[in-house]
Amino acid sequence: MRKLIVSMAALAAAIAPGLAAAETLAESMVAAQETNPSLAAQRQRLRATQEALPQAWAAALPQVSLSGTAGWSDRDSDNPLLETGRNESWSSSANLSQLLFGSGRVLAGTRAARAQIAGAVSNFELARQTLLLDVTRAYADVRQAQAIVAARETTVHNLTRLLEYAQAQFDAGVVTRTDVAQAQARLAQARTLLVQAQGALAASVQAYQRLVGYPPSELAAPARATGLPTDLNSALESATRLSPVLISAESSVELADANVDVAAAQGRLNVTLEAGAGLGGNFDDSFDDTSIDSVGVRVAVPLFQGGAIRSRTRQQRALRSAANLDLASVQRTVQETVTNAWTGLASARAAVDSAREQVSAAELAYEGVTLEQETGLRSTVEVLNQEQDLLDARIALAQAERNLVVAERQLLAAVGTLDVPSGGGAIQENRDQLRGR
């Protein structure tokens, strides 16, 4: 068992080779934001969605095309008078069309494109803040696991000394064999739990590496989060303006409304200016060349499409109503999330204060019980119980500190303001570029 503990400790110490300097939460966030493949994929999806705007504008710009053909034909007939022999000819043409009036089709298309881009930007921002929150959890989990391993190592060390003391007391005839057996049982249990804690630490390290891209070195204690709302009302008010989930739902409503206009415009007047120029001739006869120029206005109005246009319009109106209902549902969800995050932060702060008091009192009690055991006022089992109380207090403090770090960032994510702390060295995204201008 002792060899296994030493091996696990060596593995944990070798997890981050070459990284001796203490790493901060801000540095971990920066690394994840710049290298995480899931966020990079979301960024590429955003760039793909941005192309919807120039595609929508293209309908309002001139459309120019060029074409050319060349070929030969040979007509054979039983009647010699009808034989024309081999004919080699060519032709070319240039055509231009310009939309003059589309009954609002282009404007509706650009509105839909901008709504799509706004939704994609919100989805990217949601993915980014979700990643930062996941990094915070992984960072805090590693620190918690490290603290638990350290606490259990201290417990193993203390119980080893207590077993040696009990054995010496037994050899001197002061205590019974029961005291030694109690100390042995607790030590064996502590070693088993230490191995389990080291396994949990290894799992936390892997989760951290998956998000950040490299294993953690020594992790510094996270600084208190800045920019937290001062009260619940201000948190809810900020969420209505900044929450990516809510902005995405609002963009979906705008997109659905634009799609109604796009569908309705398909059944309205369409006016297009058209111009063309053509040139053709015969390879064998340069005097046979001809040219054609044309300019005109084409007016088109769908009169009957089997009810397809009206059906599509009704369909988009139903989808618009669904988008509005989804928005109302998201508003309730955001309110619930922000409220729960606010109360969770208050609870986490109180838990940290209580856990620190518990550790302080448990340490003092452990020292007292140990001294009283040496004078014969306390039994071995009382010292063992107090050692367990001290271990429980230290583990509770590690859990409470982890929960506080996460709760602060969770509230910022619920509001929509979670970001890399200022001075963290993160590359700032160009917001105008993200929105496709």
Image (cartoon, rainbow, N blue to C red):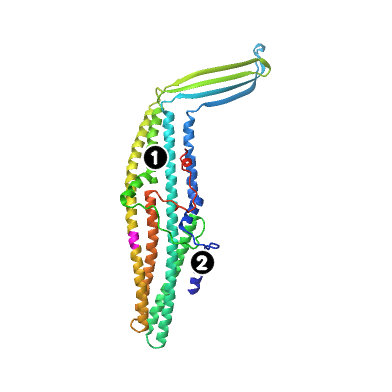
Q: Residue furthest right?
A: 284
Question: Where is residue 214 drawn, in percent x and y?
Answer: 52, 57
Residue at screen point 49% across, 63% down:
218
| Residue 300 in view | yes
Q: Residues within 10 Å of mark 2 (few under 14, many from 20)?
A: few
Pointers 1 and 2 in contact (C-beta within 8 Å) = no
Residue kind at label 1, given as amino acid type:
Ser
What secondary structure is found at the residue carrying circle 2? helix
User: Is 388 or 304 nearer to us in this picture?
Assistant: 388
Q: Which residues are magenta?
A: 347-351
Relative height, residue 192 to residue 321 (above, below): below
Instruction: Return the residue nearer the eye: 267 or 365.
Output: 365
- Depth check, front residue: 306 or 124: 124
Q: Is residue 36 above or below residue 274?
A: below
Q: Farthest residue to the top: give it.
A: 81
Evaluate whether residue 333 shows in this view.
Answer: no
**Residue closer to the observer: 23 or 50:** 23
Could you say where residue 379 lies in the image, as x and y percent from the top left? 34, 81
The label shown at residue 347 is none
Counting from the top left corner in percent of width and height, residue 62 is at 51, 26
Measure the alpha-carbon separation of dots 1 and 2: 49 Å
> Any magenta on residue 320?
no
Say above or below: 68 vs 230: above
Residue in view at x 38 percent, y 32 percent: 260
**What kind of secondary structure does the magenta stretch mostly adopt?**
helix
Residue 65 spot, x, y in % from top left: 55, 26
The first of marks 1 and 2 along the sequence is 2
Q: Give the quarter of the image for residue 400.
A: bottom left
* Residue under numbered circle 1: 251
In the rendered image, the residue lying farthest to the bottom is 173
Residue tagged by mark 2?
A: 13
Using the image, determine if residue 80 lies above or below residue 61: above
